[in-house]
Image (tube, helix red, strand yellow):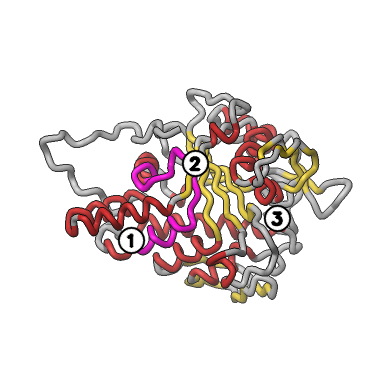
Amino acid sequence: MTHALTETDSPGSRRAPSNRRAKPPRRRRRVWRWVALSLVLLVLASGGVGYWLYSDLNGNIKGVDLDKAIGDDRPEKLPTSGQNLLVLGSDSRSGANASLGTGNVSGARSDTALVIHVPEGRAKAVAVSIPRDTLVTRPECTAKDGSTLSSKKRVMFNSVYSLAGPACVVKTVEQMSGVRMDHFVEVDFAGFKGLVDAIGGVTVTVDQDIHDTSSGLDLTAGTHRLDGTRSLQFVRTRHGIGDGSDLGRIGLQQQFLIALLSEIKKQDLLGSPTKAYKIADNLTESLTTDSGLASLTKLAEFGRSMNGIDPSTMETIMLPVRYDTQDPNRVVAAQPQAGQLWQALRKDQRIPESAKKSPATGGSSS
């Protein structure tokens, strides 16, 4: 997860008085704050050239006005509901994505979908993965060609994106959960690979050999430093784990998310403006957000409000699902577990242990 961000400063934070120089930020900061500060240094150092670089990066980001696209048919934003961010990984094979060995499927789908809930106080976050094979009710939306797409039951969750784009995915998630999304961020394959390569790779540990001829991943049990290409293979792998379904790879995606955020947080980007620019250039070209985050400044402000969150404490949960009785290759939200999970997020309450257990596990040990 409108042109002005709300609650951009974490509780207890203060701005430095205008007549005093602000203290240098601590080493461990959110990535977008480092990027913004590094770009400010570039502006000061190179004048018009620095401003051109900033403007160039800022112009890369694509923004979607959710209020205009969705209208008033949205859940109420409760005053104590924290912040909710929908993160989408697009599997488009067009443009720079075509050379990444991701297949020849036309169009694009939401290959990965995470609802990240940040409670009031910004101390700990929860990431809820929505399996892409989940059967959902798609609400009425505007299709990509501008026509009206009527509501339809029992459609695959990842098909919503291909037919109507990210705003309809946001609307679908809001209607199935009753949780209002404050923001959304979408990054495609090329942006994901570029980010990992720009930070020098991500370290993961697997407890079993993984051999997936479909994704191309070939890992032995143990610890590995993955570059962008192998990281993309890692988060897309499903045939080499569990029962080969989409559910099996969600555990890998969640593991990688924590490893990636931890790596980003410990990087000294302020000490390397060139590296900061490379990261921003790679990522912003592949980034789509809601209009409330569609600039480097807004992204930095949002990142600054999340300073107190330690990735190692982030809780990862898969939306509780069960196998569909009509099609065992598909899943549906399991009740009452899913309802309990969404209610806890709506009210910013502790998630019951019962709401974290999914009847369908994808053959994993979880």
- In front of the other: 342 or 303: 303
Q: Could you classify mark 2 by the number of other residues whose Cα lies within 10 Å: few (under 14), some (14-19), or many (20 or more)?
A: many
- In front of the other: 194 or 69: 69
Helix, strand or loop at mark 3: helix
Q: Which residues are magenta?
A: 278-299
Q: Which residue is mark 3?
A: 247
Q: Is residue 359 visible?
A: no
Left or right of 313 on screen, residue 105: right
In the image, residue 140 lies at what x, y percent?
A: 71, 35
Which of the image's four quarters has the C terminus? bottom right
Q: In the rendered structure, which amino acid carries the disc numbered 3?
A: Leu
At 37% from the left and 39% from the top, the residue drawn is 305
Q: Are marks 3 and 1 in contact (CB under 8 Å)?
A: no
Q: Nearer the viewer, mark 3 or mark 1?
A: 1
In the image, residue 240 lies at what x, y percent?
A: 69, 69
Mark 3 → mark 1, Cα distance in angstroms: 36 Å
Mark 1 → mark 2, Cα distance in angstroms: 22 Å
- In front of the other: 300 or 313: 300
